[in-house]
Image: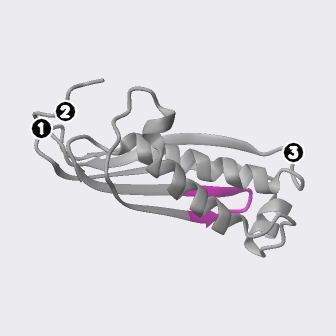
Amino acid sequence: MVDVTPREPTHRRALARCQVKMMPETTTKVANNAITKGDVLAAARIAGIQAAKRTAELIPMCHPVLVGSVAVNFSIGDDFVEVEAQVETVDRTGVEMEAMAGCMVAALTVYDMCKSADRTMTIEQLALWEKSGGRSGPWRRSEN
């Protein structure tokens, strides 16, 4: 692991996104809360929050950080559910991995809850979209 003990704690934030591609009929079921396993987005939100808080247990060289907040939100398109996870902390290292883990586990939960209705689903485009704090400063992915 990288030694972060000499660093001063600063406010840090990271935002990750991905998409769960699916048939339009499946997005309609998700939007109408008609998936037989239950409320897809509520379950995925809780799973994403739990994953963000436990990232250091999953990624071997990831520092445990004191997660101050996690927000997991969804947008439903015609043939996808977009997942967005934002994580904030005041600590010595960033929360990019926590945001990415939260986003991916939320997407996997959407997949798990919907798989009986749609075996064609894919999870795509997991990426860090923004980060702030720390010595490298703010960064934002270009929309292009």
Cα distance in 3D space between marks 1 and 3 = 47 Å
Distance from label 1 to label 2 (Cα)?
A: 6 Å
The kind of secondary structure the magenta stretch mainly shows is strand
- Left or right of 78, for residue 57: left
Helix, strand or loop for disc 2: loop
The alpha-carbon separation of the residues under discs 3 and 2 comes to 44 Å
| Residue contact at pointers 1 and 2, CB within 8 angstroms | yes
To which residue does mark 3 refer? Answer: 119
Label 1 crowd (10 A; few <14 / some 14-19 / many >=20): few
74 shown above or below 4: below
Left or right of 104? Residue 135 is left
The residue indicated by pointer 2 is 4
Residue at image coords 87%, 66%: 36
Instruction: For mark 3, give the secondary structure.
Output: loop
Rate crowding at label 2 as few (under 14), some (14 to 19) or many (20 or more) other CA atoms within 10 Å. Answer: few
Query: Amino acid type of disc 2?
Result: Val
The kind of residue on which mark 1 rests is: Arg
Looking at the image, tell me whether mark 3 or mark 2 is earlier in sequence order: 2
Q: If you read the primary sequence from the N terminus, does the residue marked by circle 1 or circle 3 appear first?
A: 1
Residue pictured at 74% horizontal, 56% vertical: 79
Mark 1, residue position:
7
Disc number lying in front (3 or 2): 2
**Range of the magenta residues?**
74-83
